[in-house]
Every structure is written in C-alpha cells, then in structure tokens.
Amino acid sequence: MLLIRHGQSEFNVVFSKTRVDPGIRDPKLTDEGKRQAEEAARALRGRPPRRLVSSPYTRALETAHIIADVLGGLPIEIDRRVGERAAFACDVGTPLSGLRQAWPGLSLDHLQEEWWPRLEESEEGLAERARDFHDAWDPHPERREIGVVTHWGFIRASTGLTVPNCTVVHMAARGAAEIVHPREP
C-alpha cells in the first residue's frame, strides 16, 4: 500500500509561515501543490498503483486526480476514513452537493451531506480510524496495488512518520513503512 500525502494547499502556505489557522475551509491545491502531485505521479511510474483511494477533501481529490491522469486514468474510490481529524478550519469539507458538482465522475453516494467530523478527533480516535481502515484492507488481495491519497495525521497514525506534502510512503505492513518519494539524497 502506498500512502500519499496531498500536495501543498492554500492553507499549508499560510500555516507553515505563521503557525496560525488562516480560516480557509477545504482549501485547494496551490500551483506548487499541483506540481508536487505531478512529480509524485512520475515517481510512481516504476511501480504504479492499480487504483487510488482518496479522502473527500478537495486538496486530496485534486492530488488524486492529477496522479490518476499522469498514470493513465486510474480509478479513484472515496473513503472518508482516510480524511483529517477536524483540528483546523481546513478540515471543514465541502458538502456532498458541492462535491457532486465539482467531481461528477466520482461515486459519492456513500457520503452524507456533511461527511467531515464536527468536533476535533482525539489522537486515540484517529489511531482507531486508521486501524479500522487498515483492518479492512489488510486481507484484501489488492492491498499492495492501491495508492491512498490522504493527510499528515492519517499517515502519522498509520506509520509513525511525519511527512511533508506529496510524500509517498510504502507501507508493506503495519509498522513497516519507508519513504519512497521524495528520495533523500
């Protein structure tokens, strides 16, 4: 399984400079974030996933679509379990009706109109959600062939790693993870 943190978002630009929540809800990718997603996709060409699972947040969906397009039109499945934990304004998502307008080709019927967490999720809750996702995928025969476009917190809960935007982590098994992009010099 490949865990892919979304590209740089409008929120990330401000927060990384100020460490103050700028109040941007469900931010889009910046031009740099789009470039990062294209670069991550090119890095995956040697061992591309067969499909992508994505968080329903806009920054993750944009990242997933860029990666899917670069790798030849991979299918994208939406799973809110790989989303964020509602710690900042950026973790307020776009309502289902807005997602349907923006992403008409995606299957979204399993989401509620307000699908994101209403209250900040605890570290224990995040860890439990990550375990639930991995428990569902561990026995799946395609586990090794999926890319999961997700967020900093979910990757940290899954692997213990804290990674920058558009980092790709190969998770061979729980507790066994390595960064495959970007490669350290």
Image (cartoon, helix red, strand yellow):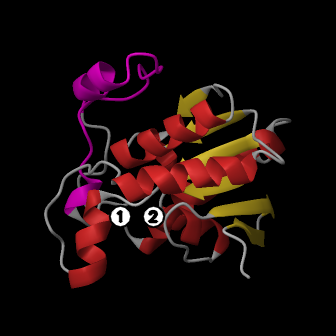
In the drawing, what numbered circle is on residue 30? none
Quarter assignment of residue 74:
top right
Asked if the stretch drawn in magenta spans residue 5, the answer is: no
Amino acid under disc 1: Glu
In the drawing, what numbered circle is on residue 125? 2
Horizontal relation, residue 73 to residue 178: left or right: left
For the residue pair 180 and 34, the one nearer the viewer reads as 34
Residue count near mark 2 (Cα–Cα under 10 Å), binned few <14, some 14–19, many ≥20: few
Q: Is the magenta stretch mostly helix, strand or loop?
A: loop
Give the residues drawn in magenta, as a range.
89-113
Q: Do the residues labelled 2 and 1 touch (CB within 8 Å)?
A: yes
For the residue pair 67 and 152, the one nearer the viewer reads as 67
For the residue pair 36 and 148, the one nearer the viewer reads as 36
Q: Residue at x 63, y 77 (%)?
A: 160
Task: State the image coordinates of residue 61 (x, y, percent, origin top left).
Answer: 44, 39
Task: State the image coordinates of residue 22 (x, y, percent, origin top left).
Answer: 15, 68
